[in-house]
Amino acid sequence: MSDTTANQSRFERFFVTQPDNFDLDNKYTEAALERHKREGLELAVRARWIAMGLTGILLIYLNPYWDVLWYHFILLLICANGWLIRRAGRVGQSRTELLLIFVDLLIMTLGMIIPNPFSDDVRPLAMQYRFDNFQYFFIILAAGTLAYSWRTVIAIGSWTAMMWTAGWIIAWWVATPIPGITERVNEALAGFPDVAEMLDPNSFMAPQRIQQVIVFLMVAVTLGVSMRRLNRLLMTNAGLERERANLSRYFSPNVVDELSQNDEPLKQVRKENVAVLFIDIVGFTKFASGRDPYDVIEVLRGFHARMETEVFRHHGTLDKYLGDGLMATFGTPVPTPLDASNALACARSMVEVIDHWNLERRRAGEPEIHVGIGLHYGSVVLGDIGANRLEFAVIGNAVNVAAKLEAMTREFGARVVMSDDLSTQVARESPTGSELMAGFSRHDNKSVRGVENNMNVWMI
C-alpha cells in the first residue's frame, strides 16, 4: 500500500458520515439496503410532515398572534427540505443528501435564534433561548433514525451541538443588553446570585446551553448505537434471504416455506411413498460429438433451466443434475396429496416445453433435442446424510425403477414411460386423473432391465 493511500485511509476514519463497508456485490444485501433506505425515507418524510403540522398547531396555541406565521414559514422550509432529502437519498454516502441534512439543521438553528421579524415585541436577544426551542431538534434526530445510518445519526447530533453552541456564543457576543435590568435584578435578589442569573433577561445562562448540547449528544450517540445494531440485523436478514434463495434453486417455494419453519428442516431418516422422475436427452453423446464445448454447455444450460422450471412449477424437488439429465422427486421432503399427479403433469409439461424449444431451434437451424422420461411411484428412504455438511438423499427401489423406465424409452421409442403403480396412484389422487392419462397406452407384463419382476407400464 502506498503512503498516499495509507494516509487517505487514516484520514477517512475521522469522517463520521463515511458509509459502512457492506458487500454491495451481493445483490441480496444491496437490495435489502436499498429497500430499507427507501422505506425509511418515505416514513421519515411522512413523520416529519405530521410532526411539523402538529407543531404548527401547537405554536398557534402558544402564540395566538399573526407573528406566529414566521415560525410556520420555518416549518414549511423544513418540510420542503425533507422532500428534497427523500429525492436525493440513496444507499452509501451522498454528498447532496448530507448537504441537505446540514441545511435542515441550519434552518432550525437560525429559525430559533434570529428574532421574529414580524414581532414588535422588544426583548433581549438572550430571551430567545428561554423558550425551550432546542427540544424541537429531537424531532429531526428521531426522524433521522428512520432513514439514515448510525453514522449519519451521530453526525446529526454533532452538527446540531456545534451549530447551537456557535449560535448562542455569537448571539452573546453581538447582543446589546437592555441597560439597567441586570443591575436591578441583582439588587432585588441580593444574596441569591443563582436566582438572579436565572431571572435576568440579559443572561444567556451558559451552563443550561452547555447542558442541552451534552444531553442531545448523549441521546444521538445512544440512537446511533441502536441504529448500528439494527443495521447488523438487517444484514443478517439479507443473509437469510440469500440462503432462502439458494434453497429455492432446489426446492419449490412451498417446500422452502416448510424448510424455513422447522428447526430440523428435513427431519429424521424415514420411509415415504413418493413419485420419482428421471429425464435424459436421447443421443446426447452423438449430439455433442464434434461440437464446440461452449455450444454444448449452452444447450445443457437451456435444457436444465427449462426442465427445473417445470419441476418447481409442479411442486417438485430437484434432487440432482445427471449430466444431460436430472432427477426430481415429488413428495419430498414433505408429502402432499397430489404427488403422483404432480409428477405426471410435470412430465407432460416437459414434453410440451421441449416441443416448443425444438420449434425455436428449427427456426434457428439448430438440431432438435429429444428426451426420455421415466416415472415411478413407490417407497423410498429419505433424510439427511453426512456429518458437518448435510445433504438430503432419496434412495430406494423406486429410484432405481424410475431410472430403468427412463432408459426403456429408447427401446420402445417412447417419450414417457411410467409404471402402473404411478398410474394407479394418479387415479386415487385426482378425479381428473384420466385427463393426465390421455394418450398413454398400457403395455402389460414387460421386462424391465435391472428389475427382477415384469411390470405393467404406460407409454406415450
Image: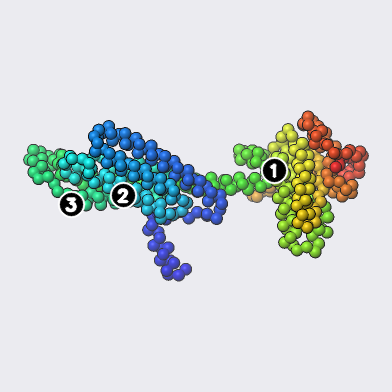
| Residue 178, quarter of the rendered image | top left
Mark 1 to mark 2 CA distance (whole Å): 56 Å
Residue 94 percent across, percent down from the top left: 43, 54
**For the point 56% across and 53% down, which residue is it?**
26
Report which residue position mark 2 lands on. Answer: 106
Q: In this view of the protein, can residue 313 be seen by the observer?
A: yes
Q: What kind of residue is marked 2?
A: Leu
Left/right of residue 404 with respect to residue 59 in the rendered view: right
Q: Nearer the viewer, residue 91 or 333?
A: 91
Q: Residues within 10 Å of mark 2 (few under 14, many from 20)?
A: some
Q: Residues within 10 Å of mark 1 (few under 14, many from 20)?
A: many
Q: Nearer the viewer, residue 212 or 105?
A: 105
Circle nearer the N terminus (2, 3): 2
Q: Residue furthest top?
A: 431
**For the point 44% across and 41% down, which residue is it?**
43
Circle nearer the N terminus (3, 1): 3
Q: Nearer the viewer, residue 11 or 44?
A: 44
**For the point 74% across and 45% down, which residue is it?**
328
Mark 3 to mark 1 CA distance (whole Å): 75 Å
Report which residue position mark 1 lands on. Answer: 312
